[in-house]
Amino acid sequence: MSADGRAAGSFVVDHLASFDAAVPDSTLEHGRVGTDQALMSPEEAMRRLRQLTRRRSVNTTRVTLIVTGSELTVLDVETNAVMERFPLSLVHRPTAMMSDATSDKCDNAVVLIVLGEPQQQLPPEVHIFQCLKHRASTVTAAKLLLLLCISYL
């Protein structure tokens, strides 16, 4: 991030789904949320999205993801209204999900697990976005590069 706080990345994407990232402890893969809950993996989130798309169509919302040194902001493309804002420190395991199948409706997706805010007692959430003009790995790399830069400050 630059010293003046400019965005490290701005990406127009389709928001595909959001849901609770807490799962029963028996499926623990990547981290503990509470005493009886674990954190959903990005792969598990994509399986859930694919199940949803098989049962019904998924309503998408076109948004702009803006990654800065301190937060991830989700803006409505049509109105530029802030839909959500997450501290970057709570964005856990940004993952690019690619598919070799040309018919995969969930290809080129970014899965973001946003950890809950303990002060506000908010649960962790999964947010899945489909990249339109960029490779999903470019979006996740923007967040990872910022984390590397911040760790050296």
Image: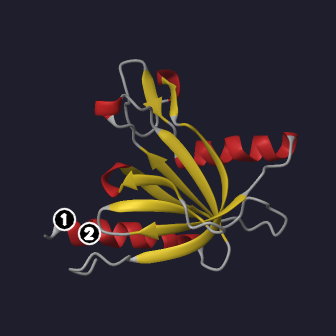
Quadrant in which residue 48 is drawn: top right
Relative to the observer, which residue lies in front, 116 or 6? 6
User: Split into 4 quadrants, where in the image is the N terminus?
Assistant: bottom left
Q: Identify the residue at image location x=77%, y=41%.
A: 51
Report x, y in % for residue 122. 41, 32
Report x, y in % for residue 75. 54, 63
Q: Is residue 144 visible?
A: yes
Q: Which mark is residue 148?
A: 2
Relative to the observer, which residue lies in front, 91 or 4? 4
Q: Is residue 138 visible?
A: no
Relative to the observer, which residue lies in front, 85 or 137? 85
Q: Is residue 133 above or below residue 83?
A: below
Calculate the distance from the C-alpha at mark 2 to the C-alpha at mark 1: 5 Å
Q: Secondary structure at mark 2?
A: helix
Q: Secondary structure at mark 1?
A: helix
The amino acid type of the residue labelled 1 equals Ser
